[in-house]
Amino acid sequence: MTPFKGNATEGLWLMYGPDLEANPPTSWADFFDLEKYPGNRGMGAGGQGIIANMQYALIADGVKPEELYPLDIERALAKLSTIKDNLVLWEASPKGIEALVAGDVVMDWGYGPSVFKALDAGKPIHLAIGGFSTAVDRTRDAVLANGANQANAQIFLAWWKQPEIQAAYAEATKGGLIVPIQQVIDLVPAAMQDSLPFSAKYPEGTFFFQDNPWFGETNEATGRSNLDTVLDAFNAWRTGL
């Protein structure tokens, strides 16, 4: 087996249902405004979903994307508490989209490939782009230092990083980019440009990367990684501990 791991760079997009088509949300503050937009909200229940929930809560509370880190966990949870009784958590992004289509929630965020597959299938959902800061989950390729087949792994990476291969992967996955650079984006068909983070179709500043290195650092207060600290805090909040 080639000792390689690589996943896509995906946008975490905000969607709303047909009931809000005449008055769509225009900011993450709107996502948290139950008076202006009554109804349930969908969010992720674990892993990357929790990170996104925390980031979006802070942005809704006035924090700029470039100032998110280190994450203010208490502030994020305080903001999430304002919609806790109207929060529907999903374990997989397609489940959140199903809830939106069914009318069980009026807004939800989801991972790019599942969002754009739903749009292609004609599901009655809409993207909220204008005024939003959309998070991008950036993952990295890795070759294990002590793994077998090191030479084959490097050969695979050289092939995998070719712009034509990357563009084909983005097209096949409905928006999953491994290398989100203009040379790759330009090769993706025009009809798919809406699904690509950092496409020229969107204004500068629409997307931001989460600070992955920060999550790997040790939290001095807990002696655990920042990732574990954030996940533990969210799960304790969720269960009322």
Image (tube, rainbow, N blue to C red):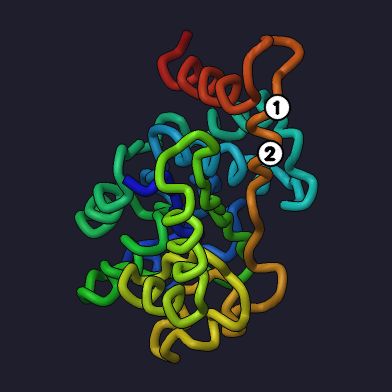
Residue type, mark 2 in image = Pro
- The residue that appears at 23% across and 59% down in the rendered structure is 101
Q: Quick one: SS at disc 2? A: helix
**230 left or right, relative to 3:** right
Q: Is residue 196 left or right of residue 134?
A: left
User: Residue 192: x percent and y percent?
Assistant: 40, 82
> x, y percentage for residue 163?
51, 79
Residue 88 % position (x, y): 34, 38
Q: Nearer the viewer, residue 71 or 150?
A: 150
Question: Contact (CB < 8 A) between labels 2 and 1?
Answer: yes
Identified at 23% across, 70% down, the residue is 123
Q: Which mark is residue 213?
A: 2
Q: Residue at x 59, y 46 (%)?
A: 56
Q: Is residue 212 above or below residue 156?
A: above
Q: Residue at x 60, y 78 (%)?
A: 202
Label 1 amino acid?
Glu
* Circle on res. 74: none
Task: From the image, tell me which residue sits under label 1.
Answer: 217
* Spatial CA span between label 2 and label 1: 7 Å
Q: Secondary structure at mark 1?
A: loop
Q: Which residue is nearer to you in this view: 221 or 87?
A: 221
Question: For residue 209, what is the image quadrant?
Answer: bottom right
Name the one closer to the observer, 75 or 205.
205
